[in-house]
Amino acid sequence: MIDFDSELNKEQLDVVRHGDGACLVLAGAGSGKTRTIIYRVAYLLEQGVNPEEILLVTFTNKAAKEMVQRLERIVEGQMKLPWSGTFHRVTYKILRKYASLLGYSNNFTILDSGDSLDLLKLCIKQEGVDRKKRRFPSAKVLRSLISYARNAQMPIEDVLKEKHPQWMDIADVISRIGDDYAKRKKEAQAMDFDDLLVNAYLLFLKNEKLRRLFSTQFKYVLVDEYQDTNRIQASLIHLLSSHHKNLLVVGDDAQSIYSFRAADIKNILDFEARFRGAKVFRLETNYRSTPEILFVANDVISHNASQYQKTLRATRDVFCRPEVHPFSDIQEEAAFIADRVLELRDEGVALPKIAVLFRAAYQSQALEVELVKRDIPYEYRGGVRFFDRSHIKDVLGYLRVFHNPVDVVAWSRVLTMQAGIGPASAQKIIQALKGSDDDVDLEALGQSILSVRARVGWADFLSVWEGLHACENPHPHELIKSVLDSNYVTYIENEHDNYRERLQDIEQLALYAERQPDIAQFLADVTLQEGFTAAQARGVSDDDEHMVLSTIHQAKGLEWDTVFVMGVSNGQFPSERSLKEPKGLEEERRLFYVAVTRAERLLYFSYSLTGGFRSALAGPSVFIDEIARDLVDHHNFRDLPLIAFTDPSDSVDNVSYVAEDDAWNDWGEKRTSFLKSIDEY
């Protein structure tokens, strides 16, 4: 027998013993939500419920495996839950038996991401689109668009308006390709991952007998991370729990941060409206963070209007308040973090217990440079290190051929990304250039040795090449700006669904280049960065002592003793794009809340006074300004009592201030002092 009273707190125990009917469990960060849902399953089994009658759904294979393993430890023996797993695994199991009712054979094929791309490329070709001759999104971008539309249950045209307005002029073509893609999958008796969800939903909508069969079988339906469900997933769960109406969902609306994947926060916020008489439980006892960190977390999320109110309470002892550190620029910010990491290591904090989190991947560049300088090993979670990213290597390739026209490797890279130029054509150009003079007519050279198709790509390359040579001052910063002003941007938009983030990376590279006026030295510096990080990456294993760098999205569900949240600057966090989207600011605030609640003991916020590529003045994020002053320790910018800036695009004349010192009541004096501080830098 399990001693539930001694192994669970009162909040958790209430869920475990009284989780019948429609139940919404609002599980605050660090409150033991997985523990609660697993003990609920154990309780049902102890009450004699057949494992076949329990449906337990989560989002990742890792989470599903962990749940089963934890359940086995609790019940002290091997326990088979035949209907536990991810949404995709559960729907696959259903479709494998009943797909014939939708016109599929029961031995249908599942397309992986590579298969999906290959089929979409065929559809693009069948539509008559020649991407080597016209501007058109890649198969990867199309797959992302189609997937979002299906999971959000939106027409493709509406998705284009919301996510990719630059493609609205070819919306009809994209829609036809989407239809052809669906038709070809059906003809091939194949389903992609989205089909597993959509087709299972259609199966239950169209076949009342089958819906009744499964909803009758599943006496208890439990869903983890409910705030991350999309409309299709929530509808599926509704149907499968429709007979017994024992649906228990666990989640935290304050951690709903995946709308870009079509997750719909309304699923959790509207739960009581959809399931009349639903019980609402709150898990508010936090086992992770100090009281001071939770005071900040509660204060941060209180500014959201659309939410369930929760107040996290700490079980840990009091420690110290989180700190806010402003800096003159991102390099100074990165240097502070690197130095503080070394101090913490000397104080006994192991590197794996330290994490630096950021809103967007491009923000890691300056810090990566500083960590390499100080020989601090790090692991980059959920992505590729800055100087190893393909688009960064592309831009550096352009600079390399500009600086060294006989760099064969760089020539090969910049040429083969052009439409119609493959390895063979690239080699023709490289060989021709080897035997030519410096003042060779490049346009004529291409006309003489390239096919008609390859000449299109050659013309695109020449437009970038001519832009580089048009720079009056061949400073690395100006050369990178030239690439950003070229048709390389169109190439990025065509090839990648996350093109905005990639362009931000390149802008960050331009900022980094400002510090090195000599192109030879700049290229040497970044090459050394590449070489070091590549070697470091090869040497990192699970046993190595290394700290963590991660975007906040990738950090969800994780925790560290010490967390630095960098780049909490106006215009960067919240992101400018999010402010243009409905409820975008609230999702950004939830993302900030997730960052705060990753910390166990020490929490640092940092921002730079100067902003990104296009802004001269940034200052702190609105999220920093929203935190009550007595909850954090503010380390002022060179002891100046400057706290808030109204807008990153404002000139110095239009900056508004909040002053700590009552002696600074005169606007003119404040403005003069601020201008003086700027001049010092």
Image (cartoon, rainbow, N blue to C red):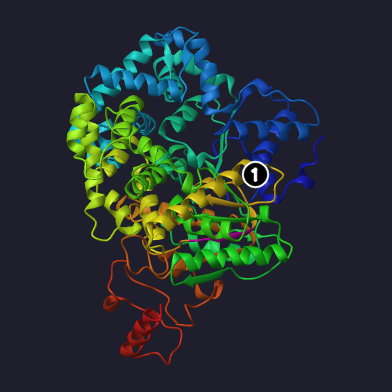
Report which residue position mark 1 lands on. 540
Q: Is residue 298 left or right of residue 403?
A: right
- Based on the picture, tell me whether residue 564 belongs to the magenta stretch: yes
Q: Quadrant of the C terminus?
A: bottom left
Q: Residue at x 25, y 16 (%)?
A: 126
Q: Quadrant of the N terminus?
A: top right
Q: Picture coordinates of residue 256 (x, y %)?
A: 47, 46
Q: Residue at x 46, y 66 (%)?
A: 607
In this view, 172 is above or below 290: above
Q: Is residue 253 something that shows in the picture?
A: no
Q: Is residue 181 left or right of residue 561?
A: left
Q: Picture coordinates of residue 176 (x, y %)?
A: 24, 22
Q: Picture coordinates of residue 56 (x, y %)?
A: 60, 30
Secondary structure at numbered mark 1: loop
Highlighted range, magenta: 562-566
| Label 1 crowd bin: few (<14), some (14–19), many (20+), radius 10 Å | some
Check disc 1 and give the amino acid type: Val
The one of 44 and 474 positioned closer to us in this rendering: 474
Q: Residue at x 71, y 57 (%)?
A: 350
Q: Quadrant of residue 291?
A: bottom right
In this view, 580 is above or below 652: above
